[in-house]
Structures are given as C-alpha cells and as structure tokens.
C-alpha cells in the first residue's frame, strides 16, 4: 500500500504545513523579538507599575522594539523585565521613561538607548536611569488640589459678598471699605449740595473770565500778548539761524572748527593746570634736636612740595647753635716764619636748605643746598616706611658728613638720633637726639575743620 496516497496522510500533512506557516507568520508579526534568538534582555525597577501590562510593547522613538517579558515584586518595588531587538544599541547610559498612551491609564515603556560613546550594556543588566514623568494618577491628584483650592476661593468669595460680610478675608475688607466710601460720599454730597453748587458756579465764572481774556483786543489782551510771544520766538529763530550759518562770535565758536579747537585747547590747558594743582601734596616738617657736644638745641622748619609720588621739593630754615665755623690761616715772616691758624664761630647762624628728591620705592636720593652748602643725601625706609636711615654730606670744602635714624611711631610724630660732622672737619662733631612732627595737607585740613 502506498501510504503517500492515503487521504489521512494528505490531510495531516496539509494541517502541519498550514500550522507551520501560521507559526512563522505569528513570529514575524509579534513584537517579541525573542522567538528567533534576535533579542537582548534588561530590567529596571519602578516604584509604581500601574498601567503596564505583561507582553505589552516596548518602544523607542515611538517604534515597537520589544516587549515586557515579566512584571514582579522585588524589594518593595516593581521589577520590569524587558526584551528588545539585538540591533538596539543599549549602553550604560540607557534610560527608561513610562509614557501614557491615553486618558484611560494605559502606559508603555519608552527606552532611550543612551550615548553611543558609552560602553554597551551587558546582557540582562539593570537600567538605572529612570526618567520621571507625570502619570494620570499624578495629574488627577493635581486636579484634586486645584479643585480644593477653587472650593476655598468660592467659600471666601461667598463669605465676603454675603449680607453681613466678614473682615477675615482681604476681599471682604475691600468690599466693606468700598461700601463705607460710597456711604461717606453719599453723606458728603447730600450735606453739601449748596457748596457743590457754589463750586460749580465759581468754575463757570473762571471759564467765563478766560473766554473774556481770549476775546480782549486791547494792548494788554491775550491776543496782543500772544503776538508779542510769537515775535519773540521768531527773533530766537533768527538768532539760531545766524548761529547755524556761522555768523557772529557765537556762530564762529559753534561752526568754525579752528575756533572750537582753540577753545578746547585752552580748556584742556586750564584743566591740566587745575588737575596738577589738585594732585600736588604739601607737608610741613618741624624738627628739634639736642646736640650733646654743643649742649644746645638745633631747630628747623621745612616745607615739602610733592607734585607726584616719585619726587618732591624741600625748602627749610635751620637755626644751628653751632653756627658757622670759619678757619683763617695767617703766615708771618721775619726772623722767624710761622703760621697762625684762627678759628671763628658765629653762634645761632640761620641756614637755608633747598633740595630736590627722587623716590625709587623705599630709596630716596636728594640733592641741592644743605645748610648753605651744596650736598646730597640718601634715605632708605624699612618696616613699611616706619623706620628710615639717612646719610648726607654737604659743604665739601670742609665735608660735613651726617648720619642718623628716624622712627615714625604715631601718625606724623617721630624721633631721631645720630651723629653730626662725623669726620670732625668743622670741629663740631656731636651725637644728637631729637623729635619732630610731619604734617601733610590732609592733616592740616583735619586740624582746621576740628578747630572750627
């Protein structure tokens, strides 16, 4: 018997073929990519899986790319296992977002593959980046809050506009105040009807007077005044026109560029002069020193004029108890030749000092006339200009070399100590100590204002 020709075999073979075609077509149409081994698995946790259904679609950019394989409870949260197509490049920065599909509460999983520069997500790994988006429950909760707020507003409005009203709410107070104001206005208008009529009559009289002035054709009337005003405006127009054409002194000043440049240059010169004067600093230096060898006091007063931070001029007057020492030599001849040296000292001789100084940070170089003789000096500051060391030489015929230190201990007050005529070429070598006061123009302004 040929079993291939048996009807039962043919029917069975037909059923198998049709079933196979249906299975293949179902796998091709299904969103589940795991049937033919073309899938990638992952999972994530949600606090609420409401609206998600097992075997529902997983989408990317709105296109189905997989399905939800399983939904179960894990550690108090909903664990969602998904399967997506293997050609979806999931990386470690992949993200999940639950999106609503309609107003009935259905939702689907939207997957974002992540940055292509990140590492690929391992098979069956957890997706940690979950994007939060308002669900229908959240929306309904917010609508409930809004409804509650509207209910409170409606209640307040009802209380504010009720017959008795209430002053508990601001709207009720506004309504009460408006009612009080309108009531007061009604009383005022009813009690002052006569006065209001008088005010209306006075306003009518004023408007009538203004109309009479406007219609007055006399020399003092409104029309004549308006004509004079018009003529004045016309004259102003003529003057401005001449200025624009460059006529007259003012016109040349405005229109002639050379004249304007000269005026600008003169103004700049005055501004520079005033600016230099305002920036110039002036100070007074009062000093007294006790000369040990001489046994008397040496005093001086000086004026410092400083046009800039890097230089200044000093003019001083010195009262020196050692005075000026002059030595004369007399030679006599005869049977015996001899030299006679005579020394003359003039007491309390007034000396003048005039110097120019240049500042180099903490170093200052000075030069000029020092106590009636040419000389120079060097100052160096320490301790933030609190301590100053000075050496100076002058009167080079009998070089007077003087060195001393100055300590500024409080504002303009200072003390100094040193040695005068170190080389003793003037027979006046002496140690000295002293004190002084250095006042700037700012200090003088302060003293004068305090005194007044």
Image: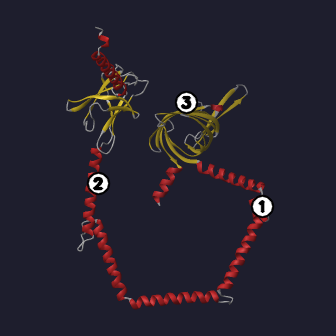
Instruction: Give the left or right position of residue 61, taking residue 47 as reference.
Output: right
State the separation of the CA atoms marked 3 and 2. 99 Å
Residue at mark 1: 252
In the picture, the disc for residue 3 is none
List x then y, in percent, for residue 284.
54, 47
Mark 3 Cα shell of 10 Å, populated few (<14), some (14-19), many (≥20): some
**Location of residue 165 (image quadrant):** bottom left
Instruction: Give the left or right position of residue 119, taking residue 419 as reference.
Output: left
Query: In front: 117, or 331?
Result: 117
In the picture, the disc for residue 146 is 2
State the separation of the CA atoms marked 1 and 2. 75 Å
Mark 2 Cα shell of 10 Å, populated few (<14), some (14-19), many (≥20): few
Mark 1 / mark 2, whichever is N-terminal: 2
SS at badge 1: helix
SS at badge 3: loop
Residue at mark 3: 422
């Amino acid at each position: 018997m040929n079993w291939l020709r048996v009807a039962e075999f043919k029917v069975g073979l037909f059923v198998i073929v049709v079933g196979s075609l249906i299975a293949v077509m179902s796998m091709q149409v299904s969103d589940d990519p795991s049937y033919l081994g073309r899938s990638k698995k992952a999972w994530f946790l949600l606090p609420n899986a409401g609206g998600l259904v097992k075997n529902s679609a997983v989408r990317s950019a709105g296109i189905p790319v997989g399905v939800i394989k399983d939904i179960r409870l894990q550690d108090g949260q909903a664990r969602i296992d998904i399967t997506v197509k293997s050609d979806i490049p999931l990386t470690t920065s992949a993200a999940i977002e639950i999106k609503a599909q309609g107003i009935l509460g259905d939702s689907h999983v939207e997957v974002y593959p992540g940055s292509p520069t990140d590492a690929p997500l391992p098979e069956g790994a957890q997706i940690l980046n979950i994007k939060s988006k308002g669900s229908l429950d959240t929306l309904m909760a917010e609508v409930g809050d809004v409804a509650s707020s509207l209910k409170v507003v409606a209640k307040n409005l009802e209380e504010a506009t009720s017959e008795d009203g209430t002053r508990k709410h601001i709207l009720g107070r506004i309504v009460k105040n408006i009612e009080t104001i309108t009531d007061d206005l009604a009383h005022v208008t009813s009690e002052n009807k006569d006065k209001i009529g008088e005010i209306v009559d006075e306003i009518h009289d004023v408007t009538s007077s203004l109309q009479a002035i406007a219609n007055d054709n006399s020399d003092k009337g409104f029309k004549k005044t308006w004509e004079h005003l018009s003529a004045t405006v016309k004259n102003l127009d003529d003057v401005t026109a001449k200025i624009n054409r460059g006529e007259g002194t003012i016109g040349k000043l405005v229109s002639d560029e050379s004249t304007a440049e000269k005026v600008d240059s003169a103004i700049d010169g005055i501004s520079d002069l005033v600016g230099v004067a305002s920036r110039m600093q002036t100070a007074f230096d009062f000093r007294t020193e006790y000369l040990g060898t001489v046994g008397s006091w040496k005093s001086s007063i000086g004026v410092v004029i400083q046009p800039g931070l890097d230089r200044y001029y000093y003019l001083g007057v010195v009262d020196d108890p050692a005075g000026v020492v002059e030595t004369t030599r007399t030679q006599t001849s005869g049977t015996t030749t001899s030299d006679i040296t005579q020394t003359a000292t003039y007491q309390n001789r007034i000396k003048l000092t005039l110097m120019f100084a240049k500042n180099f940070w903490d170093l200052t170089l000075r030069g000029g006339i020092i106590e009636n003789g040419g000389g120079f000096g060097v100052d160096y500051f320490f301790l933030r200009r609190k301590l100053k060391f000075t050496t100076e030489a002058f009167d080079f015929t009998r070089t007077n070399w003087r060195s001393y230190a100055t300590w500024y201990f409080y504002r303009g007050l200072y003390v100094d100590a040193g040695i005068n005529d170190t080389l003793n070429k003037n027979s006046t070598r002496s140690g000295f100590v002293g004190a002084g006061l250095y006042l700037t123009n700012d200090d003088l302004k302060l003293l004068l204002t305090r005194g007044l």
